[in-house]
Amino acid sequence: MTTSSTRTDLDMTEPRRRFLRASGWFDIAWYRSQVGDDFASVEEAIDHFLTVGARLGLSPDAALGAMQGGPFLERSVETREDEPPAADDPQLLREVALVAESGLFDRDFYASAWPSVAERLDDLLLHFCRFGWREAKQPSAAFDTWHYWSTHLDPAREGVNPLVHYILTGRAQGLSVRAEWVPPRPGTVLPVEREVRRACLFAAYDADGLLDESLIAYVRELARFADVYLLADCHIDEAELAKLADITVGAWAVRHGAYDFGSYSMLARDLVGWERLEGYDEVLLVNDSCYLLRPLDEVFAQMSQRMCDWWGLQATKGVARTAEAVQDVTVEPIPMERVRRELLAGYMQEPEFDFHIGSYFLAYRQPVIRDAGFRRILGSVHRQRGKAAIVHKYEIGLTQHLIASGYDGDTFIDALYPFQPVFTNQYFRLLGRGFPLLKKYFLYQNHYDTPDLRDWKARIRAAVPDAPVDVMERNLLRTAPDDQLQRSFAIVTLPDGSVSVPTARDRREFRRADRSSPTFDHWWAFAVSPDDGHLPPNARAIFEEVRDDPSIKKIILTRSRRIDLEGDNVVVAPVTSRAGQDLLMRAGVVLVAGRPGPGLGVRLDASHRVLAVRDGIDVARRSATTTRRPVRSTEDVVSPLTGYVAASDFDRTVMAAVLHPAPYGGGVATGLPADDFVLMPEDRLPADLARELGELRALVAGRRLLLLVPERRRAGPHRLWSDDLAGLRRWCEAHDAVVGIRHLDDDSDRRRWEALGTAALDVGRRHFGHVSVLYREASALLAERAGAALDFTVTGRPVVPVLASDDADDYLVDVERVMPSEIRASVAGVCEALDGAFSDGAVLHRYIRARSLFRRYVDASNAARFVHHVRRTSLEARC
């Protein structure tokens, strides 16, 4: 084993010299300005740096100087770092060579700490230099990357690999490479002569943009003890935020993507401010990852009497990848007094520090609030490449910093229970000792396979009779990933005392079982889209056609989104579950959104008919259809498509290229089933679509609706975003119209459309799940997506294409010729097109030509035709 201790005494002068020469990191002009010496050559200046400058803390160039000496970078929480360099990047390879010669990388340690990486890769040193340090991974037991980074460098940016910096200059300065334990000083006593002043920085998130009743109850309880400042990492309408007006001092909604610590950071630094926070005796950091079970009076009464600098509800020893969960409730916890006075010193000396106090509820008193290191770390939070980096840098990192700084911490639960007690059966012991919260993650993720959580409501009520478990359940069913929740609740204790854990088959097991399983033509599987968990619109329309037909078994294969569709002979199961796999392997007809691989995750044999039902018309880009993932083995090949639904014969030809190698003859030009929802009489609409139609009409309030469908997830700007949107607003005012914007995925989108003012309506998916409802009501469509422009022609109403890209040659078809009207590139052009829609015979002729090209049928019988075709061909195959 190569350990750090075997080579720390090596003379690294020559490797450092070679690195500085080749890397371009040595700026002689900069270095001269620092030392005030006029060196005869670069070599002489480098020698001075290696023998004198590095020891004095000088840097070889301005960039490293800023990283080490500050002032540190002020940046937005939403900031994304640049992508790591390519594996063959010359500078990266120089860093790899330098670290290799230093002996400070321990391959065995790295493989043990990160086994998932070691299983995939041989060159772990390259992984560390390319990815690992950016995620705060340690190269060895002797070097704590995040301690060095956050203590000696700018923790807000990835300017230099901390280990490379240490080799070049930090070691010569004697900079610390691991946090040292410091005996805690006497803690802080809260005032008794007056009421304690507290601020609570509350981090929230809701995918649907709602303030749930369970969250409002939690915030209301916190407001009894603190001034609450809430930041939601999502968009929430002003009307929804108004629910917090009487219980918070401030409430904001900003999509930043940096998890709870991003909200804490933005609140402390930007929205509330450190100066204001200094006026409080305690500052709480609380998030919405928990349900409140009981009042917090006991928590604050106890902790107000404790002498400490910071506290939380409970402490944890161990991280998920290094420790096994302890479900055995007979294992005795360790008193926190012993942990603090005897064991913490040992924890700090372990190869990897993994003790921390749960970050879902923390309180910091004046000494910590004013601590420069604490502020530096919390102020450095920005978007990371994964949640693990957030946990290591900020949850564990802040605990480590405070302990190493001599601040005395405490916990409401005055004992350290075996590993992660809030996620195991140990939790119910905490509950009996007054623990006030329930982690949502425990119920649905259940990553330690705690059994019998399906009885969670009764188990909670046994300890807390008044706990609002029904309110919690409503939130859980709306927000929790349904497939994970079902798996969690299926883990049960058997009569013999063993635990049954449902496990899905892997790909090889599934294929073996599928080959021997019978398939039935009257079993139809409807797979949801892997992108959003919804049934594709065409699949939903086909389902509605056969919903009440008892001769067809309808299998809804779900993912994270809960789907409640009733009918005759309908069954719902997660596609990733064994139950879902059992149903899938017996389904003779399988309907998927696009290619089967992402939708199903397994390969089906030839006894199944796998049909792509799509989202809508697609005139895909060549670059998207010609990029193929190499096949590495027969097990890696996805299920072949038997066929696909098409809107017309021309559409069938296009889709044959999009879905290659699906056979052209498998295309079924029955028309798009989802068109039925646009054209059918209103009294035939399914109940959920009818409800959305009523809500849309109430929102539009009798005005003309211009539906705007922007392009999604593109590098370039939307065409209209750089233009005079105020002109479109004026057009709406003159014509009593509003613009309904279909995709408002983040705050940057919303800010760009603010120029529309009250003329803009959010008709995104979280409000209106079915685009067909919008097509029914829209007077015209503004489309940045070519497929949407063609979809809307089923209505016979005007379409104005505002394609978001100039690379029209990349489409599979001549997109400018097949569009139902001239492509516009400005607001003035859009308004002109709307004013003149169909008034010119040539414009109307172009529209009719485009519709006839992509529409074989314009009626509400497309789903019926498709169902008839599938049944007929199934019968023919049997004969």
Image: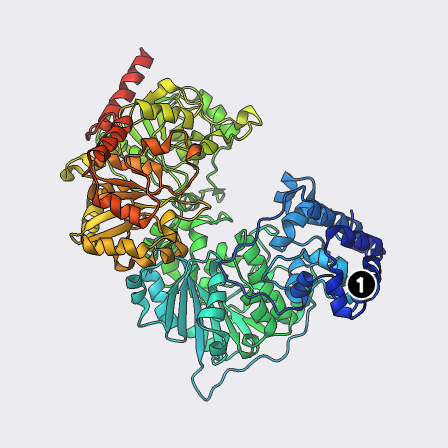
Q: Quadrant of residue 823?
A: top left
Q: Nearer the viewer, residue 425 or 340?
A: 340
Question: Horizontally, is 409 left or right of 554 in the view?
Answer: right
Q: Nearer the viewer, residue 524 or 657?
A: 657
Q: Nearer the viewer, residue 772 or 159?
A: 159
Q: Is residue 345 visible?
A: yes
Instruction: Residue at 21% x, 42% y: name it.
Output: 836
Identify whether 683 is placed above or below 439.
Answer: above
Instruction: Residue at 62% x, 56% y: name it.
Output: 136
Residue 457: percent from left, percent from top: 36, 55
Q: Quadrant of residue 8?
A: bottom right
Residue 361: percent from left, percent from top: 48, 66
Residue denoted by label 1:
49
Residue 161: percent from left, percent from top: 67, 55
Q: Amino acid at mark 1?
A: Phe
Identify whether 210 is placed above or below 303.
Answer: above
Residue 316: percent from left, percent from top: 56, 61
Q: Nearer the viewer, residue 356 or 860?
A: 860
